[in-house]
Amino acid sequence: MARIDAFLKLGTQQGCSDIHLAVGVPPMLRLHGDLVPIKFRDLRDAELESYVTEILTQNQTDHFARGNDLDFSYISAEGGRFRVNVFRKDTGVGATFRSIPAEVPTLESLKLPPVITKLCDYHQGMILVTGSTGTGKSTTLAAMIDLLNRTRKLNIISLEDPIEFVHRSKQSQVIQRELGTHIPSFAEGVRAAMREDPDVILVGELRDADTIRMAMTAAETGHLVLGTLHTTSAVKTIDRMIDALPAEEREQTKSFLAQSLLAVITQLLVKSHDGRSRRAICEIMVTTKAIAKLIMTDQTHQLPSQLQTGKEFGMQMFDQALLAAVQAREIDPDDAYSYATEKRLLQKFVTDTTMISKIDAPPMPPPSST
């Protein structure tokens, strides 16, 4: 058993999402959103590097020795599966291990909005799951793939960096390919997938113009494309897609988004009401004729008003979702308040009154003229 497995075992037993290892500090666990040190000495440079290199292949060792970061999946001797990032910083080696549950979660177990289940009925178009790092995008996509796998007879090709949840083919055939192991880039992976008779293509990240362009082509030519972006709202997602491609392709990109973008699901992870877990809270945009018109006429700044009034289509703003979850006692009101944009909506639920901003404070009196 690799020595690093002891830390990983401890982390998974504690129910953490991530284990952080860095020189000069003890190992850290990400527990329900907070970073907590374990009772261990500060890690030394040579010590941590020996822990890490013990689990690397020769190719990975050579790649890392050339100054490159590493992204890979790792199965510990204790049976846990992890997504790993290994890097160098000013004080030495660092590594982050993201724990991957053995069972693929369902949309129901994640308590995601019902509209996401309905979106999985589509046969063509693009669905984007967005959010900052660590907000559960991969987990949501895994649950969507699982639903398709259980309920439809499809050829599903998943392009990942690295492979996280392992899908066993059920009603569908699920082919998982890993960046750097099976494909040189996401763009090349999509290009190859289109020659493999796919029904659904999952693109781990739309990280560059070539990948976005290929994913758009796939969605326009009769495939359902699922992908992620590191954007924090529907407006920013639309703008990122348009700005990612050259100016001469702007009108073509807007036309694609208006006609083929099915939905944007943007996520936050908020502490549960009991503080023992985290819950995904979603902003959801479903492309309607009104939204398509706003995209085509460069009025994406008006999208929030469409989300706010689009409940019949399954749309919602973050603030609406946060308020509903707080009222249902599903999430911690203080954590929800910290994420809210219009904080007045949640102010009366806050238990830690020191958090309350001064937005409702009376204005300062004008200075005396005497």
Image (tube, rainbow, N blue to C red):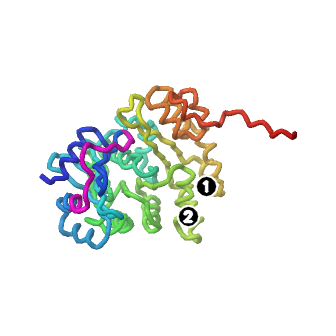
Give, as a three-letter code, the residue at label 1. Answer: Ile
Note whether 110 is above or below 246 in the view shown: above
42 or 177, which is in the foreground?
42
Q: Residues within 10 Å of mark 1 (few under 14, many from 20)?
A: many
CA gap between label 2 and label 1 equals 13 Å
90 or 96, which is in the foreground?
90
Rendered residue at 48%/46% (across/down): 266
- The dot on residue 237 is none
Q: Residue furthest bottom?
A: 66
Whether residue 284 is in magenta: the answer is no
In this orientation, does residue 65 appear?
Answer: yes
Residue 315: image x %, image y %? Answer: 54, 40
Q: Are marks 2 and 1 in contact (CB under 8 Å)?
A: no
In this orientation, does residue 152 appear?
Answer: no
Residue 130: image x %, image y %? Answer: 46, 51
Looking at the rendered structure, the number of numbered marks drawn on it comes to 2
Labels 2, 1: front one? 2
Q: Residues within 10 Å of mark 2 (few under 14, many from 20)?
A: some
Residue 253: image x %, image y %? Answer: 55, 63
- The dot on residue 295 is 1
Q: Which segment is the magenta one?
A: 32-49
Residue 91: image x %, image y %? Answer: 33, 62
338 or 167, which is in the foreground?
338
The secondary element bearing badge 1 is classed as helix
Note whether 44 is above or below 367 in the view shown: below
- Compared across the picture, whether 332 is left or right of 343 comes to left
182 or 225, which is in the foreground?
182
The secondary element bearing badge 2 is classed as helix
- The dot on residue 243 is 2
Give, as a three-letter code, the residue at label 2. Answer: Asp
- Compared across the picture, whether 21 is left or right of 132 comes to left
- Compared across the picture, whether 240 is left or right of 215 comes to right
